[in-house]
Amino acid sequence: MKNYRKIFYLFGLVTMLVACNDAIDIDQPGRLDADAAFESVADLQSGLFGVYANYDLSGEIAFSSIFTDELSIGFDNGGQGLADYGFVLNAGSVAPAVFWTGGYAAINSANRLIEAAESITPEAGEEAQYNDILGQSYFLRAWAHWFLMEYFTTDYADDNALGVIALDRVPSIDEQLLRNTNGEVYALILADLDRAESLISTDTSDPTFANRDAVTALRARIAAYRENYTLAATLSQQLLDKYGLANRAQYEAMFLDTDNTEVIFKLERTNNDPYDGQGATGSPAAGGWAGARFAFVDATLAGSPYFEMGRSLFNLYDPADIRYDVNVAPTSLIDPDYTTNNDPATDILVIQKYPGSEGQPLMNDLKVFRSSEMLLIRAEAYADAGSINGATNSAAALLKQLNDARFGTDTALPVFANQTEAFAAILDARRIELSFEGHRYKDLKRLGERANQGVLKDPIDCAFNGACSLPATDFRFTLPLPIVEFNANPGLREQQNPGY
């Protein structure tokens, strides 16, 4: 996997969008067509590397962290992210435009590879490789559609709500496509995952390529978001049985990219990537190292952090928890009397989630699915069913299991008075475990009301602008369709999300 981005430019000839303002303006004249670009299974393999080059979580990590309560404005901030930090979100904002066009660029690249594969007959001995390439392409197309659904549908659990434009082909340049319902988009996603599972190799040893376990993990996540907790419980348990949880040493090594014990699927980042530093605020296809979304130089106090850890998040960490060591840089300035002193200069919480690898500061692999997320999905399923307390087969038992692994000792078994308390504990556990991994915005959108929680920043972090809280029911937990899309596809104006 270390070399795939070096050769993605071959596929770029047929996948790059010439403008970012039209998700369906794809079939550009003068472009090298698939029949000429792909003539063999080896060409398809190179093309698959190019499809992967369209996928990136760093912009999603940045937006989720800035818009919610994971961050505070760093001492070296020069104006970066202030609109998102103040909950300013509209059809002209950066994130909706880049998320929308990036998602459709990824879908376009997968569609072109799938269509190209139809004209190629594998030679003897190439059938398994051919099927694996095609299977991964179907998975990547499903994942890109799901990425768009996460941000642009108002209600994951309502099949009749508007979703996004479902694209299982490369449309012609003059088509004006409208949004499909959630049910229609889910049907395409799940059909693609069925195809992927039937075609992808049974080898799951390399988490940097989509494999059958990644298919199961995506199914589990989708089922949880749709509140189909019977299915979510079954799928997440399958992965927990196989992967388990990392111990403290393995957990720390995972974020140095030297251990994959609980990694189901990740996007590898390596030197010589066509990704450089901060990139754009968006995902996928944004470019950039995740650590560079928070600091200019490195993950230390001297590394010019322009975002710091939010105090309300920091206050949830226990120094005895290995997640404290992973997320909080030891060079941080920690003021135990910060509420009295009320001076951000004495309380600088430097984020160390992405310290760097291969000698490159701030560049780390991007974890897409981990077994700890599967455990928390399983805990949701127990809570939804009312199994909130008890030493076994309960939400409380699973949260204790996670804490035992992260503290390296026997921890207290939680006790919840009701489902609201259980969901609040699960949401807090997700906030701690999955911090700076791009989940917080979506978690509040889908679980915040059940947990009676929303965005809540520490007063010291929002004193300068007053944007301290945002209820989970706020319309801004769904992104607007971007105005740049309306320029080329005006019919979508009538399908804009509520509030915009």
Image (cartoon, rainbow, N blue to C red):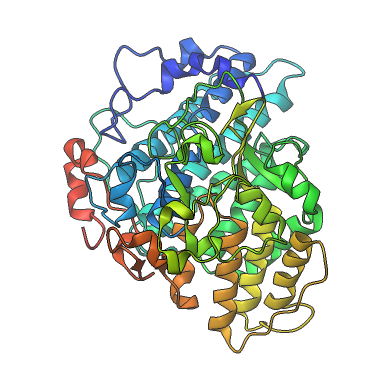
Percent position (x, y) of residue 400?
A: 74, 72
The residue lying at 69 percent from left, 80 percent from top is 414
Residue 133 lies in quadrant: top right
* Front residue of this view, candidates 208 and 155: 208
Horizontal arrangement in the rendering, residue 119 relative to residue 240 (left or right): left
The C terminus appears in which quarter of the rendering?
A: bottom left
Q: Is residue 120 visible?
A: no
Number of numbered discs: 0
The residue lying at 27 percent from left, 34 percent from top is 22
Residue 471 lies in quadrant: bottom left
Horizontal arrangement in the rendering, residue 25 relative to residue 322 (left or right): left
Percent position (x, y) of residue 126?
A: 72, 20
* Front residue of this view, candidates 70 and 400: 70
The N terminus appears in which quarter of the rendering?
A: top right
When the figure is inspected, residue 385 is found, relative to residue 491, above or below; the finding is below
* Front residue of this view, candidates 410 and 288: 410
The residue lying at 62 percent from left, 32 percent from top is 268
| Farthest right residue in view | 409
Percent position (x, y) of residue 265?
A: 66, 42
Percent position (x, y) of residue 321?
A: 71, 60
Q: Is residue 98 visible?
A: yes
Horizontal arrangement in the rendering, residue 495 relative to residue 322 (left or right): left
| Farthest front residue in view | 341
